[in-house]
Image (cartoon, rainbow, N blue to C red):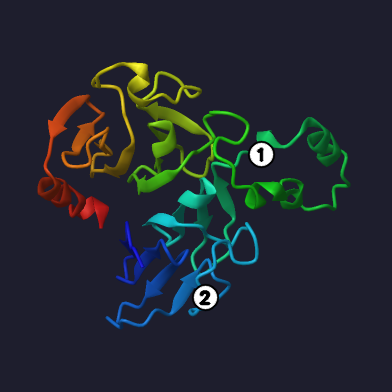
């Protein structure tokens, strides 16, 4: 098992993503080392199937990051499926998906959906969003993802997803799956490392891995570039470049806003 980003709710229940086992485990606040809830494996603690039962609102493929909102809803970065899922508190079935945009449904399907009887649940019109796993579905968009690696939540409700494959970080308003801010690229349709420049600048990214927000909602991005040895944190608001070794980056990650 390789566990990456973890998160804890206000009651200190811990949620750990287990990459190789394609699941997320929840450990109770009592301090027990035995998990009580599992995401991604249909309730089974002994299964390690990638996309158990097929790509769905409850399957996972190499989950990399976890974050909890104020209601203990779970944001799970599902890297292998090029998406992020949102699970309401107490549910292991997602109700929202990032990175598999509805606009990628064909025009024919969209027209058919608009003609459905009003008694048909709206969620069924776009059920394909939970059953697709393509990188940049529909193209590089404000709603697409490629190999997402991390998620961070701001106190103002914003959601930041580290979209490593597109060399950017996307920021979403609370509840929306369409980004309103992009870090690392000049627009929402660009995806080149360092925007195609030979060297990095104060507004480029190359293979970002981790994003965090501090108490003032400043955004810090660990921009690894081509060197895994010397990651640096990029403070985007205001744009100031900080060099950091791994130990100091770990200190930033242990700040109260990130626990």
- Mark closer to the observer (2, 1): 2
Looking at the picture, does residue 128 appear above or below residue 35?
above
In terms of sequence position, does the residue under pointer 2 or pointer 1 come before the other? 2
Q: Residues within 10 Å of mark 1 (few under 14, many from 20)?
A: many
Identified at 54% across, 29% down, the residue is 141
Q: Residues within 10 Å of mark 2 (few under 14, many from 20)?
A: some
Residue 216 visible, this orientation: yes
Q: Is residue 87 left or right of residue 207?
A: right
Label 2: state its secondary structure.
Answer: loop
The residue indicated by pointer 1 is 102
Looking at the picture, does residue 77 appear above or below residue 179?
below
Identified at 27% across, 33% down, the residue is 225
The image shows residue 20 at horizontal and vertical percentages of 42, 63
Camera-side residue of 171 and 211 = 211
- Which corner quadrant holds the N terminus? bottom left
Q: Is residue 85 left or right of residue 209?
A: right
The image shows residue 49 at horizontal and vertical percentages of 54, 68
- Which corner quadrant holds the C terminus? bottom left
The image shows residue 180 at horizontal and vertical percentages of 46, 29
The residue indicated by pointer 2 is 47
Identified at 18% across, 36% down, the residue is 232
The quadrant holding residue 166 is: top left
The quadrant holding residue 216 is: top left
């Amino acid at each position: 098992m390789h566990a990456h980003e973890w998160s804890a709710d206000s009651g200190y229940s811990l949620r750990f993503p287990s990459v190789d086992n394609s699941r997320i485990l929840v450990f109770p606040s009592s301090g027990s080392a035995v998990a009580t809830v599992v995401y991604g494996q249909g309730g089974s603690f002994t299964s390690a199937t990638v996309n158990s039962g097929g790509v769905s609102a409850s399957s996972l493929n190499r989950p990399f990051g976890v974050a909890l909102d104020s209601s203990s809803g779970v944001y799970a970065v599902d890297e292998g499926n090029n998406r992020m899922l949102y699970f309401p508190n107490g549910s292991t079935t997602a109700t929202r998906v990032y990175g598999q945009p509805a606009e990628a449904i064909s025009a024919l399907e969209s027209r058919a959906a608009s003609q459905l009887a009003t008694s048909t649940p709206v969620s069924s019109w776009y059920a394909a969003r939970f059953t697709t796993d393509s990188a940049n579905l529909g193209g590089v968009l404000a709603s697409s993802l490629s190999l997402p690696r991390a998620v961070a939540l701001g106190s103002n409700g914003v959601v930041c997803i580290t979209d490593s494959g597109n060399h950017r970080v996307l920021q979403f308003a609370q509840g929306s799956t369409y980004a309103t801010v992009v870090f690392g690229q000049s627009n929402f349709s660009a995806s080149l490392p360092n925007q195609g420049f030979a060297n990095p600048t104060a507004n480029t990214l190359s293979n970002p891995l981790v994003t965090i927000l501090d108490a003032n909602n400043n955004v810090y991005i660990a921009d690894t570039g081509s060197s895994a040895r010397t990651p640096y944190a990029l403070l985007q608001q205001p744009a100031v470049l900080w060099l950091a070794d791994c130990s100091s980056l770990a200190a930033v990650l242990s700040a109260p806003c990130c626990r």
